[in-house]
Amino acid sequence: MTERIYDLDDPAFGRLFTDLQHSWFRLETLQRYDVAYEKEEFDAFLLRGEQPGTEPGPWQEMIRSHAAAGRKLSRVHVVIEPPTAYVRYELAAYRANAEAGEDIRVIPVLSGNWPEGVPYTDFWLFDDRDLWLMHYGQDGDFLYTERRAAPEELEKAIRWRGFALRQSIPLSDYVARLAA
């Protein structure tokens, strides 16, 4: 039976982050996500040029706690260039997470190209044992997340992570390159 979660606020999904033992990895492949908790801040960024808040909140405190305990937290976003307005917003919003201890990286690609060995599938991998595929609609709206537990699927996700990390550059390098 496939385990699915349809609400990102579901406590079962939240426990994946808080009960972490060793690591998490997030692959982001979309150029726009449409999630309710970002709407107001994204609109302010898009319409008024306001930068996302950088004050640490509960999410950043959790990241800081994991990092202090020696857990490895990493994320890679495949960015099709030129970056969309949403990706530019997200790059700015990532700063608070990076400052808290998450290793955030980018794989810049030109339209029509895709990094070798990296899937077109968003996912979270927790402790190399919990793989959650993220499913979104055409406009980036979250539909559900689906747990995959078969050993061969976990091995595939670990390989995907390796391909993504090897082809990525640090967020700070990418942001500096955009500013130049």
Image: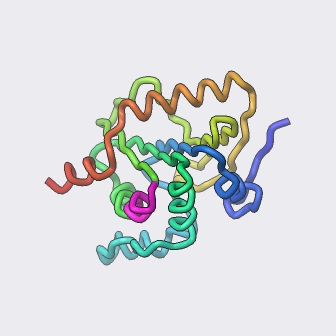
Residue 119: x %, y % from top left:
51, 31
Residue 137: x %, y % from top left:
59, 49
Visual colour scheme: rainbow
Q: Residue at x 72, y 24 (%)?
A: 151
Residue that sits furthest to the right in the current view: 1
Answer with the quarter of the image where residue 76 lies.
Answer: top left
Span highlighted in magenta in the image: 93-101
Is 121 above or below relative to 75?
above
Which one is nearer the viewer's eye here, 131 or 49? 131
Residue 30: x %, y % from top left:
47, 46
Q: Residue at x 50, y 33 (%)?
A: 161
Q: Main secondary structure of the magenta part?
A: helix
168 sits left or right of 129 in the view: left
Is 102 above or below relative to 27?
below
Residue that sits furthest to the top in the current view: 152
Is 94 above or below relative to 21?
below
Q: Residue at x 69, y 64 (%)?
A: 9
Which one is nearer the viewer's eye here, 139 or 92? 92
Q: Residue at x 57, y 45 (%)?
A: 24
Residue 73: x %, y % from top left:
51, 48
Residue that sits furthest to the front in the current view: 69
Which one is nearer the viewer's eye here, 68 or 156? 68
Q: Is residue 11 magenta?
A: no
Tell me the quarter of the image containing the N terminus: top right
